[in-house]
Image (cartoon, rainbow, N blue to C red):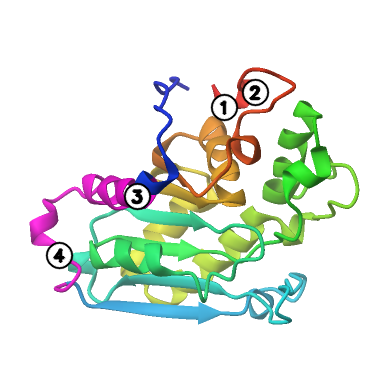
């Protein structure tokens, strides 16, 4: 896979503006033809366990179980052919923090924000062990037993399985948009997918983009240590380059 050029480091206050610019730049048609106020969208909130009983509820600190969020243009003709995959941060609930996905759908994207296991912050688990960060993220994303305790994510509760079951459900509900998305995502063809991550999620998206070609990557709300740079290593880890 061709390496991407490095991104400049910017103040956090600029991140939210950059996210909106990046999304608008990803549209195949000019943004003026798909203003958010003119694209009627459909939003869905769904419990992950309803899609597969092997998936465990993720309880947040407020006691609620987090739920998936998805949105898409009400008519397939207004879909721009791109999908936003928004990966939330620690203790977030996509059904409550869906503004970015909602905005993208107003531009003509289809979007999903899956609920996944987020009770652990990688820096709290790994401390100064630079190699540990990738193992933690891979266990969360892929469900392999790679990370030290207390990380515990099996295949059924991996981020990928949660995404796969969500797009399967959406493909049955709105096939003209979601069947082609499902077919590509299931085989990990992410070339029409924009990856966006917030906080802990902004550390997951470059690892996914390292493994699979994607349309673009948007990272926001992360500390450098929680994303891709570690004090002890004094350099970016191999998978982020």
**Image position of 63 (left or right of 107):** right
**Image position of 204 (left or right of 117):** left
Mark 4 or mark 2: which comes first in sequence? 4
Which residues make up the magenta segment? 15-38
The answer to whether any part of residue 178 appears in the image is no
Q: Position of residue 142 (x, y in %)?
A: 70, 47
Residue 176: name its quadrant.
bottom left
Query: Under tag 3, what secondary structure?
Result: helix
Distance, label 3 to label 4, CA atoms, is: 16 Å
State the residue position of label 3.
Answer: 19
Q: Which class describes the residues within 10 Å of circle 4: few (<14), some (14-19), or many (20+)?
A: some
The residue that appears at 70% across and 59% down in the rendered structure is: 118
Q: Which class describes the residues within 10 Å of circle 1: few (<14), some (14-19), or many (20+)?
A: some
Mark 3 or mark 1: which comes first in sequence? 3
State the residue position of label 1.
Answer: 240
40 or 170: nearer the eye? 40
Which of the labelled discs sits on residue 35, or is there none?
A: 4
Mark 3 or mark 4: which comes first in sequence? 3
């Amino acid at each position: 896979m061709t390496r991407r050029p490095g991104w400049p480091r910017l103040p956090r206050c600029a991140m939210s503006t950059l996210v909106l610019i990046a999304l608008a730049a990803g549209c195949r048609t000019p943004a003026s033809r798909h203003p958010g106020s003119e694209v009627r969208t459909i939003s869905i909130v769904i419990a992950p366990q309803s899609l597969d009983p092997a998936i465990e509820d993720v309880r947040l600190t407020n006691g609620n179980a987090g739920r998936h969020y998805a949105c898409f243009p009400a008519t397939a003709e207004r879909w721009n052919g791109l999908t936003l995959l928004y990966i939330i941060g620690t203790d977030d609930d996509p059904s409550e923090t869906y503004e970015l996905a909602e905005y993208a759908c107003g531009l003509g994207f289809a979007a999903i924000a899956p609920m996944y296991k987020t009770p652990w912050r990688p820096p709290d688990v790994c401390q100064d062990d630079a190699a540990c960060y990738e193992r933690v993220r891979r266990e969360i994303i892929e469900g392999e037993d790679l990370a030290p305790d207390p990380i515990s994510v099996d295949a059924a509760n991996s981020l990928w399985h949660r995404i796969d079951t969500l797009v399967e459900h959406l493909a049955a509900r709105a096939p003209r948009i979601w069947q082609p998305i499902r077919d590509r995502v299931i085989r990990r063809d992410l070339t029409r997918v924009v990856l966006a991550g917030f906080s802990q999620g902004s550390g997951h998206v470059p690892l996914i983009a390292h493994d699979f070609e994607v349309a673009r990557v948007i990272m926001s709300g992360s500390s450098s240590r929680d994303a891709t740079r570690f004090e002890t290593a004094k350099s970016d880890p191999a998978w982020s380059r």
